[in-house]
Image (tube, grey):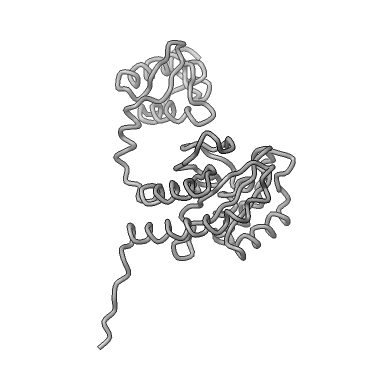
Amino acid sequence: MAGGARDLGRSVTSRVLAILGAFDAHHPRLTLTEIAGRTGMALSTVHRLAGELEEWRALRRGADGRYQIGRRLWELGQLAPDPLQEVAHPWLQELFGGTGENVHLAVRDGVEVLYVDKVYGKRAVPIVSRTGSRLPMHPTGVGKALLAFEPGWFVTSYLSRPLERPTPHTITEPGRLARELAQVRAQGYATTHEEMTLGSCSAAAPVLVGDRPVAAVGIVVASRRVRELPRLVDPLLAVAARIAGDYRAAVIGPPKSINVR
């Protein structure tokens, strides 16, 4: 289409948000043409708005001409209060220090898990998750830990969807997955074995405030060490409980004492 005809009817705000939304964990650096393709906007419009965003430091252009998210957005993001990450991070550090294994914290966002924090070391097994990235719920330990404690209607809706199969070991049969989620609820934690990534396995526990899973803590080890997972469950559950307690205190406040006369 000539000019910006394809952009008619879209506000400037929606166009800017579409450009920023074109970037994600799988597409951290994009050319103008790629941005236009992912947003459905005319290249001329993308060129103009990307230039303004770059000037404002919301986008940054590299020497190769590709754009990525700029530091101005990172600065603004730091202004958003996040008591969960604040109270959880010291406990994640303690879990990593006590086990030497990569640990991460995730929340449910729609039908995916969003990783909001991570503590890792060079000697631990590499993991696919990164802070700010998203993954399906059913093949990940943290995803299963969250899904198992969601309301029944949500679980039913999730299981009725076509389920991705990242590896040959991913459980995608609704009945089998439902039985595993029931086991997760009964034992209080979830495990995976090469369901998201070949070569790694994991254990995860929900952070429960009341009956609501506000997050999940996961720990990942190499598949060859899968027999070591059971010894990591107790410290994992302890950390999840402590995060829940601190989060409850930060958001709700300490329990009120009742004077009995």
Q: Which image quadrant for residue 65?
A: top left
Residue ID at (46%, 60%):
241
Residue 24 sits above or below residue 233 on the image: above
Residue 12 sits above or below residue 31 on the image: below
Q: Which image quadrant for residue 80?
A: top left
Residue ID at (50%, 24%):
40
User: Does residue 102 appear to the left or right of 230 in the view shown?
Assistant: left
Residue ID at (66%, 45%):
225
Percent x, y of residue 120: 49, 39
Percent x, y of residue 186: 62, 65
Percent x, y of residue 223: 68, 42
Percent x, y of residue 28: 48, 26
Residue 16 sits above or below residue 191 on the image: above
Give the mark count. Answer: 0
Q: On the rendered image, what quadrant is the C terminus found in?
A: bottom left
Residue ID at (51%, 31%):
25
User: Does residue 107 appear to the left or right of 80 in the view shown?
Assistant: right
Which residue occupies the foreground of this view, 57 or 205?
A: 205
Residue 66 sits above or below residue 182 on the image: above
Q: Which image quadrant for residue 260?
A: bottom left
Which residue occupies the foreground of this view, 169 or 165?
A: 169
